[in-house]
């Protein structure tokens, strides 16, 4: 099938806010006396906010330390920290080549969507000056199952009015690649640490995105 839509993850594909997530989780973990480092942070890529906190608790053998209500309060605290960092973003923070790639896609008549588990995706895109580049931004709060389930990519395809087989998904995390494949889409991985499913095209960075070689 001819490609009709591109569906992008946000973090690691359009912009790198991983450092903001790390700084926020680290600050919260330090406050709570929990261990947190880069290795633990790697496990949080592509998963929801609550799941991320539960991974941190699991690493520390502290799964039962907080009630559900307390967990909600703590992840809100982490998010407030993250948002304060996000507000410093500018259009110059978009990853190399991604703005040009999206412009080429729009010029070719392709639809574009963002499939991010971040509930802050609209804010991030606004700070980047890129909100008007996308036909649809998935509302992570309304997607029942997070990646590696295909739900968020299927929601995007439905909203764009295209068949999943007519979509190309672009991700930087293993969970995202699994979600794209489960949705029946062609997958492009950006610097993915492959532990299971291989992306159909594996690139080292967004600067390697070549519209003519990827879109078919």
Image (spheres, rainbow, N blue to C red):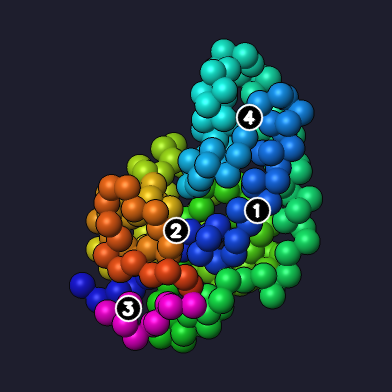
Drawn side of residue 181 relative to residue 172, left or right: left
Q: Secondary structure at mark 3?
A: loop
Distance CA(mark 3)–CA(mark 2): 18 Å
User: Which is nearer the N-term, disc 4 or disc 1?
Assistant: 1
Q: Which residues are magenta?
A: 207-216
Residue occupying the point 39% across, 47% down = 175
Helix, strand or loop: magenta stretch: helix
Q: Is residue 209 magenta?
A: yes
Disc number placed over residue 35 in the picture, else none: 4
**Horizontal and vertical percent for residue 114?**
50, 60
Of 43 and 11, which appears nearest the observer? 43
- According to the picture, the residue beneath numbered tag 2 turns out to be 172
> Residue 106, how many percent across, how many down?
47, 81
| Position in image of residue 105 (x %, y %) | 44, 80
Residue to which mark 1 is pinned: 19
Q: Secondary structure at mark 1?
A: helix
Q: Nearer the viewer, mark 4 or mark 1?
A: 4
3D distance between C-alphas at marks 1 and 3: 30 Å
Q: Residue 164: name its quadrant.
A: bottom left
Q: Quadrant of the C terminus?
A: bottom left
The span from disc 2 to disc 4 (Cα, nearest Å) is 25 Å
Q: Secondary structure at mark 4?
A: loop
Nearest to N terminus: mark 4 or mark 3: 4
In space, the residues marked 4 and 3 are separated at their CA atoms by 43 Å
Q: Residue 164 versus residue 116: which sits nearer the camera?
A: 116
| Mark nearer the N terminus (3 vs 2) | 2
- For residue 212, say whether it is visible: yes
């Amino acid at each position: 099938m001819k490609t009709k839509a591109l569906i992008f993850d946000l973090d690691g594909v359009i912009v790198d806010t991983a450092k903001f997530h790390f700084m926020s989780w680290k600050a919260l973990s330090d406050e709570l006396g929990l261990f947190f480092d880069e290795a633990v942070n790697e496990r949080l890529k592509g998963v929801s906010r609550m799941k991320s906190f539960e991974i941190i608790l699991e690493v520390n053998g502290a799964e039962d330390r907080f009630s559900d209500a307390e967990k909600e309060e703590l992840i809100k605290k982490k998010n407030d920290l993250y948002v304060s960092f996000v507000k410093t973003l500018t259009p110059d923070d978009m990853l190399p080549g991604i703005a040009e790639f999206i412009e080429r896609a729009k010029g070719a008549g392709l639809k574009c969507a963002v499939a991010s588990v971040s509930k802050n995706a609209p804010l991030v895109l606004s700070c980047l000056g890129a909100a008007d580049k996308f036909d649809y931004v998935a509302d992570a709060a309304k997607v029942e199952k997070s990646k590696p389930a295909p739900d968020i990519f299927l929601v995007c395809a439905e909203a764009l009015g295209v068949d999943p087989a007519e979509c190309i998904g672009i991700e930087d995390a293993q969970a995202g690649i699994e979600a794209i494949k489960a949705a029946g889409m062609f997958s492009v991985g950006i610097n993915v640490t492959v532990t299971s499913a291989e992306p159909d095209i594996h690139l080292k960075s967004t600067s390697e995105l070549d519209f003519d070689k990827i879109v078919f």
